[in-house]
């Protein structure tokens, strides 16, 4: 396995470990919600005037999949839809009291996970952080360009 393969395998491995470790606490604290639902709640809680298009683009999912997801969350009482007085065509979402509680719990769990992992990050120098961040940004831009190439060949469903 070359260094490139080792790096990708390493990212995948530690991501899977984080997901596995965090899943137990997430399921306890956010019972009744799927991972996708919580990520949607989190996105809506952090975004100004979120709609199906914005969510779909952010999650790299189809508008149809996001419509189903938001309908489930409305039915569960975590979201409500609204329209702006000057735009009756577009439907936006906001968190209900129940959705805000799930959002808050999710934030608290992430803080707990950050605290758990702090011991590793305290040992990383600024220069190491800068190098890793540059790499992640560069790789992310590359992936964005590859996604754009795919979108150019087929009309995206969310446009």
Image: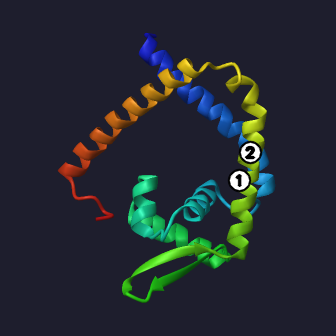
Q: Spot the residue most to the front.
A: 126
Q: Tell me the residue that label 2 is attached to.
A: 111
Residue drawn 37% across the image and 85% down it: 87
Q: Which residue is mark 1?
A: 107
Callout 2: SS: helix
Q: Quadrant of residue 18?
A: top right
Residue at screen point 28% across, 65% down = 159
User: In this picture, is 126 found above or below 43?
Assistant: above
Image: 157 above or below 12 = below
Q: Which mark is residue 13?
A: none
> How far across and down, in percent of the image, does residue 108 sit?
76, 52
Q: Position of residue 91 (x, y in %)?
A: 44, 79
Which percent across, then down, holds residue 81?
A: 53, 80
Left or right of 121, for residue 84:
left
Q: Which residue is located at x 76 percent, y 58 percent? A: 105
Determine the image quadrant of residue 118. Answer: top right
Residue at the spot 68% in from the left edge and 26% down from the top edge: 121
Label 1, label 2: how far apart the Cα atoms are:
6 Å
The reply to whether discs 1 and 2 touch (Cβ–Cβ < 8 Å) is yes
For disc 2, the neighbor class at 10 Å (few under 14, some 14 to 19, many from 20) is few
Front residue of this view, candidates 111 and 24: 111
Badge 1 marks a residue whose secondary structure is helix
State which quadrant residue 155 falls in: bottom left
Q: Is residue 65 left or right of residue 72?
A: left
């Amino acid at each position: 396995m070359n260094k490139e393969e080792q790096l990708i395998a390493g990212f995948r491995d530690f991501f899977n470990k984080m997901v596995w470790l965090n899943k137990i606490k997430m399921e306890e604290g956010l019972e009744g919600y799927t991972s996708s639902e919580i990520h949607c709640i989190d996105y809506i809680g952090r975004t100004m005037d979120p709609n199906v298009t914005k969510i779909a683009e952010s999650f790299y999912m189809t508008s149809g999949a996001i419509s189903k997801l938001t309908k489930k969350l409305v039915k569960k009482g975590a979201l409500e839809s609204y329209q702006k007085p000057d735009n009756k065509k577009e439907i936006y979402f906001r968190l209900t009291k129940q959705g805000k509680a799930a959002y808050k719990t999710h934030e608290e769990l992430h803080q707990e996970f950050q605290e758990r992992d702090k011991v590793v990050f305290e040992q990383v120098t600024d220069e190491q952080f800068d190098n890793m961040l540059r790499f992640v940004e560069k790789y992310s831009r590359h992936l964005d360009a590859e996604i754009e190439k795919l979108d150019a060949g087929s009309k995206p469903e969310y446009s």
